[in-house]
Amino acid sequence: MNFEIIIIGAGISGASFANKIVKFAKTLLLDAQDISQRPLSTNIFPFHNKPYIEETEWANVEIFPTYHVKTNYMGSKFDGIVNSEEFGRPLGKVVYLEKLLNRMIQKFEDQGGVFKDKQKVKKINKYSDHLEVITNNGQTFSCKLLVFATGSRALDLQRSMGFDTPDEYVGIYCHFHGDEDKLNENMDANYLFHINPKISRNGPLFINKGKERLSIGFLGDNQPIQELGLKLNNILNSYKKIQPFIKGLTRDPKSIVAKISKHPIKTFSHDRMLILGEAAGLVTAFFYEGILCGIISAEIASNTIKSLMEINNDFNQLSLRQYDNEINRVFGNYFKNGKGSEYIFYHSGSNMELIWDTYIKVVRKDKKLRKYIWEAYQIENIEALANYDISRDRYAGERMLANLPFLSKISLVPLFLKARFIL
Ligand SMILES: Cc1cc2nc3c(=O)[nH]c(=O)nc-3n(C[C@H](O)[C@H](O)[C@H](O)COP(=O)(O)OP(=O)(O)OC[C@H]3O[C@@H](n4cnc5c(N)ncnc54)[C@H](O)[C@@H]3O)c2cc1C
């Protein structure tokens, strides 16, 4: 079957792009998974994601069950709370991502798009004027433009087509269920972010609280996948700090192991091919926030492709460079922030806990920093993101350095100086 555009992957990046481009091109969206079996996913969805989704979705409480009012940056002794009530507007909402994706796929089909799940792309043949995609059950489809939106799950395939791959990490999470009152009694924040080197040296332990469910897990570990389940069980059974949050709730026996990739690759397009979202490493290095990057890369890709279609362009690499240039322009500063934070928090060796606790101390006492954090959630358009003001991150670094114990301050000056250089 012939299409103008084929998208591989119906996660947030592929489904967003499919919805935008289907009005202009005959489009096929493929996914390897059985979509009816997609695992639950309870995620943080800041206001900065909102401009890129439809109002009807945003207002749908089945998809967005609750506002995100409070974040708890939890330290080893104290909590650093960012309560949006201090500044007058919530931080965003919590999303049940699997439901948002189902809705987006349905809308794509309503607009004439063709969606096929349980179709793992195994091989791609490239010809001068088209590409051929072959799936695990022997089906062949052809297109003029191929879009990779495969997250971290088809890195070999993207490599086989000449793309680099981002750095891979793993995470694990599971869900707990209970009634809304019980969840709220246990935990008043919607989002908890905690750094503890014994859990992961490359990422946080997180809790995302929805309405009758919460997800808990950790990211960025490099352990063999089999050991992650045991580690999660240990944390859930024995880590005192999180017991109050899950007390009296029912655990879903299924834990989900997920790869997660970060550190953007260098080139996001080749002749007749583009790469979106996490597959391109478009995930923030410190928070592992990937939804914003997925939907913005979809927005930039659809603008690029629409303008090339208007002039009957054949999607050659030179023309597709527009997409690369725009991705670099929009995410440049935003990713610098992630890189600087990644360096300070995850590369600080034996000082990791001290540095995280110092950050908590500053969050607790410095209203200006809390306001900066709140404002980062509110960035509501691409230009504002492109102009993200990194002096705010320098400010956070300076406040942290000033609040370190005297002797640590002396030994950690080089770390902070290097982070400042990254920013
Ligand atoms: C535990 C965890 C919690 C997170 N929490 C948050 C959060 O709260 N907020 C946030 O912003 N980000 C969060 N992230 C990151 C974010 O969820 C991801 O970066 C983002 O969803 C990636 O979207 P994507 O569409 O690029 O890739 P994916 O969601 O991975 O989608 C890729 C799709 O491609 C399909 N696919 C892959 N290979 C093939 C193939 N060969 N053939 C056909 N189909 C294929 C897959 O089946 C999949 O459906 C979290 C990540 C993890 C792991």
Image: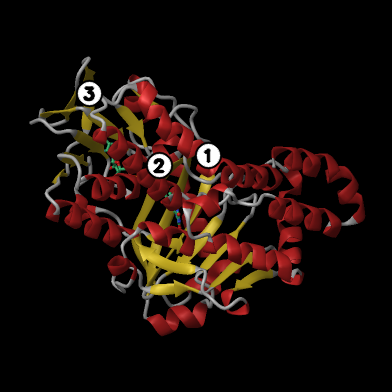
- Location of the N terminus (image quadrant): top left
Q: Is residue 422 found left or right of 327 in the rendered image?
A: right
Q: Residue furthest front?
A: 311
Q: Can residue 222 be seen here?
A: no
Image coordinates for residue 91, horizontal then vertical, percent = 52, 69
Q: Is residue 325 found left or right of 124 in the rendered image?
A: right
Q: Nearer the viewer, mark 1 or mark 2?
A: 1
For marks 3 and 2 on the same chain, the one whose residue lies earlier in the sequence: 3
Q: Nearer the viewer, residue 283 or 136?
A: 283
Amino acid under disc 1: Arg
As measured in the structure, the alpha-carbon distance from the residue carrying label 1 to the one carrying label 3 is 32 Å
- Callout 1 environment at 10 Å: few (<14), some (14 to 19), or many (20+)? some
Quadrant hosting residue 384: bottom right
Q: Which residue is mark 2?
A: 277
As measured in the structure, the alpha-carbon distance from the residue carrying label 3 to the one carrying label 2 is 21 Å
As measured in the structure, the alpha-carbon distance from the residue carrying label 1 to the one carrying label 2 is 15 Å
Q: Are marks 1 and 2 in contact (CB under 8 Å)?
A: no
Q: Secondary structure at mark 1?
A: helix
In the image, the residue with mark 2 has its CB under 8 Å from the nearest atom of ligand 1: yes
Q: Is residue 175 found left or right of 228 in the rendered image?
A: left
Q: Which mark is residue 123?
A: 3
Q: Which residue is mark 1?
A: 329
Up-down: is 417 above or below 205? above
Up-down: is 340 above or below 213? above
In the image, the residue with mark 3 has its CB under 8 Å from the nearest atom of ligand 1: no
Q: Residue furthest top?
A: 128
Image coordinates for residue 397, horizontal then vertical, percent = 76, 52
Amino acid under disc 2: Gly
